[in-house]
Image: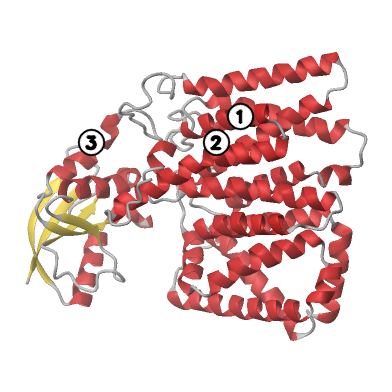
Amino acid sequence: MYLPIDAYETYRDSFLGLFFLILVYPGLVYTSFRMTKSLFWSGLFSSLIFILTIQTVEVPAYSLSSMLETQSMFFLLLSVYAIYRLYDTDNRELEIDGTTKWMIFVSLFGFYFTKYPYGILFFMACFAYELIRSPGKYKEVILYLLKHYAKGIRLLYLVFVVLMVFSLPVLRVVTKINLNQKGFKQFMFGITLVLFVDLSVYLFRNRDAMKKIFPKTAVVLWAYAIFPAFLWLFLNPDRVNALIDAQMIVNAYTRSFFLTLWTEPGKDPSVPGVFDFIWGFRTLVLFSTLSLLYFLVRTKETIWNKIKDPLVAGTFILFLELLILELTTGNKQPRHVLQFIPAIGLVGFLWILRLYHLADHNFQRITSISVILLTTSFVFYNSVYEQGILSGKFYKTKMFCYRGMNAGDFQPAREIAEHVTPNKKYILINAFHFTEKYDTKGRVLASDFDLAMKLRTYKEGMVRNDNKYRWKDWTNFDSVLLLSDICPDSFVEEKFENRTKMLNSKSTLLSTYRESSGTACLQEYKLLQ
């Protein structure tokens, strides 16, 4: 196997992205076999889920990028299986074995390490399920901690830190307070670090008592996933800053992660779908949901025993993570749902198979087999639909756009890029990236302007977005580009003026170009050395 260790960074990123996408398939085979104990169902389900995964609008593209979507797919899939295995072992009243513990560590820590915010959301979902699964046990835990740990100033400090952390997504929505400031980030890092150290030391010193009070599953989750993840987080303060930054980002052009998964691409610009053929996913979700509901009302076991089912655990935690992500982040980029597809496919097909196992007589068996055949047919149709992998067009050039198939929508970006000299080095201040320009026509093309200009200059020149932390001077650049909806624009000129004062730089206006549709205007200022 070729390992591009000495290759360009873009080649290494492409290799890793594609490598983890390839790993998803054996991951599906392994997890589905361990959960079904059947080579037939494992082979069928893993193949269908992989078809569902790659027949999305951008998974093939993201597999060749450094956006970590395919890596997230792999580790989230393993995390769902690890959760299933953990609770299955606990339900059988067995001691949790070392293999299961290390599976928890590798999968959950791997998922966390790939995507810090989503890993933390996964821990939150696990904690929520633990509370629902063992409410009586956690009542005892809370009473014990209130009696022996959270007393006096500790209790006040604990409540203060928790309220501060959970207020971030609320403040983003209901106020216009700018929390994306260095001082505030350092404050949040400090107060959470103190709480983490104090709680960790207390739990370690009283570990024998904690093992008796907490459920075995919670002890494993803390020791093998949550503690090492947060230890790594606090050893890298910039990651805490990044978490706060992620809460402050708002993507005003996409409404919902759930609708992104459910909607056909190009139908609604505010809800960009991801699947080439949406009815495969819709059929899978619909029938798996009905199977889950049938399981909850059909069997004679108590509702508490049903909730403890390991497949319910994996399904609940996966759904809850997506729900928490929906409620707490304003940055609803469609690529953020791609990581969920293999895991959703796995639990979806397992619930449909569960319907077959619950069948008691011929009518129920015929119904369950019909559901399996119908779902299989719709999901498989993804592979022969238009540019499906079996259609003969999959490996040809594939145009895709979340907001429709009209390539002319991107003409303003192409036109602006044509007025950039290929062999010059530019620093770019793109006003469309700022919230003040969210109501302009060019906002939706903000990144496309950047990309078009960078592609124009990548061989002999370069275009780099200005950043005061990265670019301490402009001595290596020839000109500054100001991009906005109008020329002159006091908003972007003020930012340019502030940066020139900061860097003690001088420049002179070289050219102005107004794009033909009126969407954008480009000004070039020559830097005077």
**What secondary structure is found at the residue carrying circle 1?**
helix
Which x, y percent locates residue 51?
Answer: 51, 29
Compared with 277, 330 (above or below) is below
Outermost residue, front side: 1
Compared with 413, 360 (above or below) is above
Please indicate whether residue 121 sits to the left or right of residue 471 in the image. right
The residue type indicated by label 2 comes to: Leu
Going from the N terminus, do you reach mark 2 or mark 3 first? Answer: 2
Closer to the observer: label 2 or label 3? Answer: 2
Residue sitting at x 18%, y 44%:
416
Please indicate whether residue 500 sits to the left or right of residue 60 in the image. left
Taking depth in this image into account, of 242 and 433 the one nearest to the observer is: 242
Q: Which residue is mark 2?
A: 261
Determine whether label 2 and label 1 are within 8 Å by CB. Answer: no
Taking depth in this image into account, of 387 and 435 the one nearest to the observer is: 387
Taking depth in this image into account, of 56 and 475 the one nearest to the observer is: 56
Q: Which residue is mark 3?
A: 411
Disc 2 crowd, CA 10 A, few/some/many (<14, 14-19, 20+): many
- Measure how far apart labels 2 and 3 are at the Cα level: 28 Å
**What secondary structure is found at the residue carrying circle 3?**
helix
The residue type indicated by label 3 comes to: Gln
- Measure how far apart labels 2 and 1 are at the Cα level: 25 Å
Which x, y percent locates residue 221?
Answer: 70, 61
- Measure how far apart labels 1 and 3 are at the Cα level: 45 Å
Which x, y percent locates residue 172?
Answer: 53, 60
Closer to the observer: label 2 or label 1? Answer: 1
Q: Which residue is mark 1?
A: 43
Going from the N terminus, do you reach mark 1 or mark 3 first? Answer: 1
